[in-house]
Image (cartoon, grey):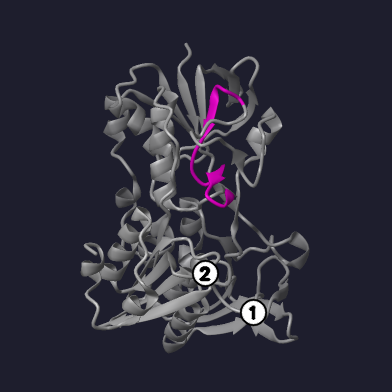
């Protein structure tokens, strides 16, 4: 029996499946996940769940009954091993499954350390899946020595949790500064100071040369020649889109699974959405790694699989929680040539401009700045940088100007 099959039971896949039913699709609908767990939220894994502040049940996107009620067949715990585009079939658990239309929401995989520098030692972890957090949670003992490798948001969030739990944390970033690819120097400085105030040692421009240990990690040698005693390590050096299945099937790959503006791949019966999908943007092909993109693109692809023929216009937004600071980001800051800083009580925001055009904002404990900037960016409107910088400016008034 054919129908729509979705490969990848993360945020994008779950959103796509739910939207298909909401739009009235009443055919066979199958959602396949490699993990044994039903679709769940990933962002809390490195925050509330790792801290022990969120129970497992609260992670799940939907109650189990939802999938039964909506007649969404969940096939969990077995990966899809092959797709035959010509026959419109896929192989999962040794069984061939046919489809009329196929959606790939395969997500992304953490980059790992090479085995020859200790990447396979026990006590070396990545942060992506529920099983990753469950495997490392017992390591978070007060006084334990943690090495975090990578100064992006995942690494900084893990460092914040560890510091709050009383661990001794060293974070190394091989690039000249933390958040080098994703935030301005001003935002990096804000979080550098925040972590320092909680006892985290951040070493920038210092990479990992070798993890030490026989079967389990016990130490690390860094690129500056120094050595550290280490009880465990967390690797946060980025992710790569999960494209192997699509590539083996013969689909076009370009920094991700190549899609058109509607989310359709190089095969007319196959679509893609979420972290794995590469789609046309204003400055060329782009790929977004965020919950917002997974939801928005997943839902739009659902519409287009049913014939809507809508173009996807990304509205980038992100967030990070570290200690008592909530960072909210709207837009993409690449290409900015000026950063305007604005303080608002206990909050702080950094506004990215290219000339006089507003590109993005980083708002730290400043939800008003985030909300206003997000609406301005999405409307294509740009207040004068001097007006934003003026503490007397009422931000909400900018929406009416």
Residue farthest to the right, as pictured:
116
Q: Quadrant of residue 295?
A: top left
Which circle's residue, 1 or 2, is located before the other in the chain?
1
Residue in the foreground of this view, choosing between 270 and 374: 374
- Tell me, yes or no, whether the highlighted magenta stretch contains residue 281: yes
Q: Residue at x 38, y 36 (%)?
A: 299
Q: Do we see residue 11 in this rendering?
A: no
Q: Quadrant of residue 215?
A: bottom right
Q: Do we see residue 148 in this rendering?
A: yes
Q: Residue at x 28, y 63 (%)?
A: 371
Where does the image place residue 222, in percent across and percent down from the top left? 71, 80
Which residue bears the numbered disc 1? 176
What secondary structure is found at the residue carrying circle 2? loop
Where does the image place residue 321, in percent across and percent down from the top left? 38, 68
What secondary structure is found at the residue carrying circle 1? loop
Q: Residue at x 64, y 79 (%)?
A: 176
Q: CA distance from mark 1 to mark 2?
A: 19 Å
Q: Residue at x 61, y 38 (%)?
A: 258
Compared across the picture, whether 217 is left or right of 179 comes to: right
Where does the image place residue 8, in percent across and percent down from the top left? 50, 37
- Tell me, yes or no, whether the highlighted magenta stretch contains residue 86: no
Residue in the foreground of this view, choosing between 278 and 394: 394
Task: Tell me which segment is drawn in magenta.
Answer: 267-284
Which residue bears the numbered disc 2? 336
């Amino acid at each position: 029996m054919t129908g729509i099959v979705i490969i990848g039971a993360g945020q994008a896949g779950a959103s796509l499946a739910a939207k298909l039913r909401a739009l009235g699709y009443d055919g066979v609908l199958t959602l396949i996940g490699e993990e044994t767990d039903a679709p769940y939220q990933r962002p809390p894994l490195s925050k509330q769940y790792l801290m022990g502040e969120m129970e497992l049940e609260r992670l799940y996107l939907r109650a189990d009954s939802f999938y039964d009620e909506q007649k969404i067949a969940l096939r969990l715990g077995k990966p899809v091993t092959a797709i035959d585009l010509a026959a419109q079939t896929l192989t999962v658990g040794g069984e061939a499954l046919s489809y009329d239309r196929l959606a790939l929401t395969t997500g992304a995989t953490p980059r790992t350390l090479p085995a020859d520098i200790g990447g396979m030692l026990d006590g070396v972890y990545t942060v992506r899946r529920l099983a990753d957090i469950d495997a490392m949670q017992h390591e978070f003992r007060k006084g334990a020595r943690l090495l975090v490798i990578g100064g992006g948001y995942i690494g900084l969030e893990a460092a914040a949790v560890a510091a709050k739990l009383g661990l001794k944390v060293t974070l190394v970033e091989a690039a000249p500064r933390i958040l080098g690819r994703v935030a301005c120097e001003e935002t990096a400085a804000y979080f550098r100071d925040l972590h320092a105030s909680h006892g985290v040692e951040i070493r920038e421009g210092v990479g990992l040369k070798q993890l030490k240990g026989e079967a389990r990690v016990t130490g690390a040698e860094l690129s500056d020649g120094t050595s550290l005693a280490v009880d465990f390590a967390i690797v946060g050096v980025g992710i790569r889109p999960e494209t192997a299945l699509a590539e083996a099937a013969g689909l076009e790959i370009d920094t991700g699974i190549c899609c058109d503006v509607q989310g359709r791949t190089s095969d007319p019966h196959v679509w893609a959405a979420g972290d794995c999908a590469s789609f046309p943007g204003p400055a060329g092909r782009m790929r977004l790694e965020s919950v917002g993109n997974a939801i928005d693109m997943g839902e739009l692809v659902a519409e287009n699989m049913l014939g809507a023929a809508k173009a996807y216009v990304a509205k980038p937004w992100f967030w990070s929680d570290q200690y008592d600071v909530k960072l909210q980001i709207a837009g993409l800051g690449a290409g900015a040539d000026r950063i305007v800083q604005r303080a608002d009580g206990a909050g702080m925001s950094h506004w990215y401009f290219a000339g006089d055009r507003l590109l993005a904002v980083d708002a730290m404990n400043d939800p008003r700045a985030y909300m206003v900037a997000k609406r301005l960016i999405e409307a294509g409107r740009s207040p004068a940088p001097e007006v934003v910088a003026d503490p007397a400016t009422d931000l909400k008034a900018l929406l009416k100007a």
